[in-house]
Amino acid sequence: MGGAAATERPFDDAVALARPAGGAPGQYVGRTSPAYANMVGPFGGITAAQALQAIWLHPDRLGEPVAFTGNFAAALADGEFTIDAQPVRTNRSTQHWVLTTRQRDAEGRDSVVYTATAMTALRRDTWRATDAVMPDAPAPESVPPTRRVKRPAWLDRYDMRWFAGAMPLEWNGAEGEDSVTRLWVRDEPPRALDFASLTALCDVFFPRVWLRRARMTPIGTVSMTVYFHASAADLAAAGTGHLLGQARGHAFHDGYFDQSAEMWSAAGRLLATTHQVVYYKE
């Protein structure tokens, strides 16, 4: 991963992990990245990508990611963190993982900030079908990039081109009819798609409650799951091009709501579906 400046390869720098001296198998050390800073702590997508990267780097990994669920126990503080990635069950073609991300708190105690489970597998060449329908969309080059003056740093790491359900222009409390968003998106600067970057891209959608209510409601993602419907070869075929993303909320109830999303390649391949639960308050 070395050799390039952080400004040239911000994503690769952010997910770079190292084995600590004398560390147990599956232990990795990383650092939060200013390039992916959010309003409080880092962008959640990059935290998930770092955890998945620990699996990808593990010498005992079997196959490719099929499912990943991350739980945000606390916002990461700026600085170093450790990830413990352990394969807890390995069968002939599947492998199950438990991951824990820790940081030292202000009192110097070891504190859990993120947990995850995952399943990897050796995929077989089988019958394929996709019941989901790719949304109609204009060509990405025909949609202007979204520009905002006030924005957390992580938004500059993505070329986002909303063409339906954009962020509210006025925070006037006017309730919308639905919470559907469609956009073209890719890493900025462009980079070849892989499982870690796809994981982060699954979290680029702003909270559905903002679109639904046009009110700057305090929120925090509690849990995010990604299901991968593509192989490494499928991701390589997507290259550095834009992905088509569609997100919608389902129910907003007593302080929590859920939202789901699909990520499609420009060629029409469904690459991933994702679901997350988000905390909100008045």
Image: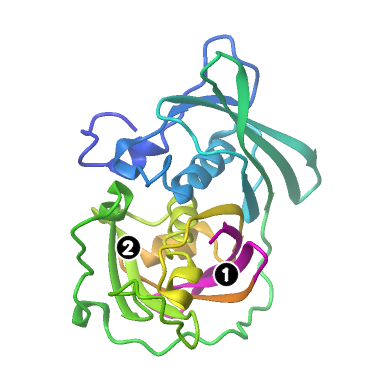
When asked about the image quadrant of residue 113, the answer is top right
Residue 255 lies left or right of residue 175; in this view the side is: right
Q: Residue 281 at x, y = what percent?
A: 56, 59
Q: Residue 255: say if magenta.
A: yes
Q: Residue 159 at x, y = what percent?
A: 26, 63
Q: Residue at x 24, y 35 (%)?
A: 6
Q: Secondary structure at mark 2?
A: strand
* Amino acid, disc 2: Arg
Q: Quadrant of the N terminus?
A: top left
Residue range of the region highlighted in magenta in the rendering = 253-282
* Amino acid, disc 1: Gln
**In the foreground, 42 or 217:** 217
Tell which circle, 2 or 1, labels the residue nearer the N-terminal end: 2
- The CA distance from mark 2 to mark 1 is 20 Å
Q: Is residue 217 above or below residue 267?
A: above
When asked about the image quadrant of residue 243, the answer is bottom left
The residue under label 1 is: 259
Q: Residue at x 71, y 39 (%)?
A: 98
- Marker disc for residue 186: 2
